[in-house]
């Protein structure tokens, strides 16, 4: 029988092979236009779960005009065919100028990244924290509204509700982490720690969010008898509580 650890090791080797092949293809296609290649997110922060986590990449290019894009497009299409999200493409100037409007995303990359090729420009990147606070408030409110709207469309079906919660979880854990940052706290390094810390700081019961995290990461299968309406209610209450507290604390 293959153990969980062996499965994880095999998966890690497979993902490293994907990364190596992407880098090879990208360097060949982009040539001197490639400034740097950066891995970010859970795969760079020790919180990666095979089957649920993506390999997130950011490419710094010297040029992003149509001819430069056309050369790397086949590589991006190959990467997408591996089941991975499209990489972000920036020039270095664009990266610096975008720190005010992508404060959450770039602060996350700055804190958890691995440079696969080229210099580490994130060491010197300045992310305006005033803009960060505003983005955290907006993204929490926008995604809370989306969660409510998606619930209305789900028609209360068990599978639909479970999928809604597991699909939205990564976004909300990220926003919980940044809500802690915006309120002057040092967030825990991993998702479970962020959930527990957020529950204590903002005042919600963490059990529902932790249960959804277990389902998403495959630590347990959804039991047939699970009361999805009650689970969703508690999950929604947690998101609502964090959103309201951030609005109150940062007013």
Image (spheres, rainbow, N blue to C red):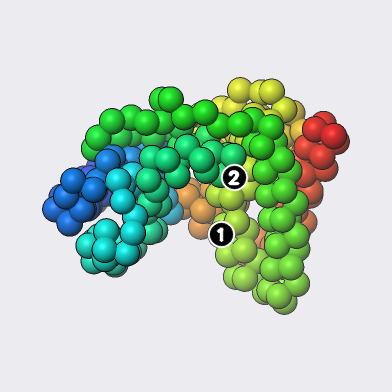
The one of 127 and 186 positioned closer to us in this rendering: 127
Above or below: residue 173 compared with residue 187: below
> In terms of secondary structure, where does tag 2 sit?
loop
**Residue 71 as seen in the image, left or right of residue 136:** left
**Residue 13 as seen in the image, left or right of residue 230:** left
Where does residue 152 sit, x and y in percent of width and height?
75, 72
Q: Residue at x 28, y 40 (%)?
A: 36
- Of the 4 image quadrants, the one containing the C terminus is top right
Can residue 87 be seen here? The reply is: yes
Earlier residue among tags 2 and 1: 2
Q: Is the Cβ of the residue at disc 2 closer than 8 Å to that at disc 1?
A: no
The one of 106 and 92 positioned closer to us in this rendering: 92
Above or below: residue 145 compared with residue 214: below
Where does residue 128 sit, x and y in percent of width and height?
61, 31
Q: Residue under circle 1? A: 167
C-alpha span from label 2 to label 1: 24 Å
Q: Residue under circle 2? A: 101
The quadrant where residue 76 appears: bottom left
**Residue 241 as seen in the image, left or right of residue 117:** right
> In terms of secondary structure, where does tag 1 sit?
helix
Q: Badge 2 local density, few (<14 within 10 Å), some, or many (20+)? A: some
How many numbered markers are drawn?
2
Of labels 2 and 1, the one closer to you:
2
Where does residue 150 sit, x and y in percent of width and height?
69, 68
Q: Badge 1 local density, few (<14 within 10 Å), some, or many (20+)? A: some
Q: Residue at x 27, y 59 (%)?
A: 68
Q: Residue at x 46, y 29 (%)?
A: 125
């Amino acid at each position: 029988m293959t153990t969980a650890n062996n499965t994880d090791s095999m998966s890690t080797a497979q993902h490293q092979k994907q990364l190596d092949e992407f880098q090879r293809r990208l360097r060949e296609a982009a040539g001197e236009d490639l400034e740097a290649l950066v891995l970010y997110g859970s795969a760079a922060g020790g919180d990666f779960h095979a089957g649920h986590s993506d390999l997130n990449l950011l490419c710094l290019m010297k040029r992003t005009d149509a001819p430069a894009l056309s050369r790397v497009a086949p590589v991006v299409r190959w990467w997408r065919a591996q089941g991975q999200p499209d990489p972000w493409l920036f020039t270095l100037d664009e990266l610096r100028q975008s720190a005010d409007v992508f404060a959450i995303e770039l602060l996350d990359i700055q804190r958890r990244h691995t440079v696969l090729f080229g210099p580490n420009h994130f060491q010197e990147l300045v992310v305006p924290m005033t803009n960060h606070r505003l983005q955290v408030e907006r993204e929490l409110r926008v995604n809370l509204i989306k969660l409510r709207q998606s619930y209305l469309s789900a028609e209360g079906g068990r599978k639909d509700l479970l999928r809604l919660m597991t699909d939205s979880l990564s976004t909300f854990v990220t926003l919980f982490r940044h809500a802690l940052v915006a309120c002057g706290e040092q967030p825990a390094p991993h998702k479970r720690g962020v959930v527990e810390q957020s529950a204590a700081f903002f005042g919600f019961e963490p059990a529902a969010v932790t249960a959804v995290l277990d389902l998403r990461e495959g630590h347990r299968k959804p039991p047939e008898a699970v009361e999805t309406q009650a689970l969703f209610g508690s999950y929604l209450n947690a998101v609502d509580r964090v959103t309201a507290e951030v609005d109150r604390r940062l007013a």
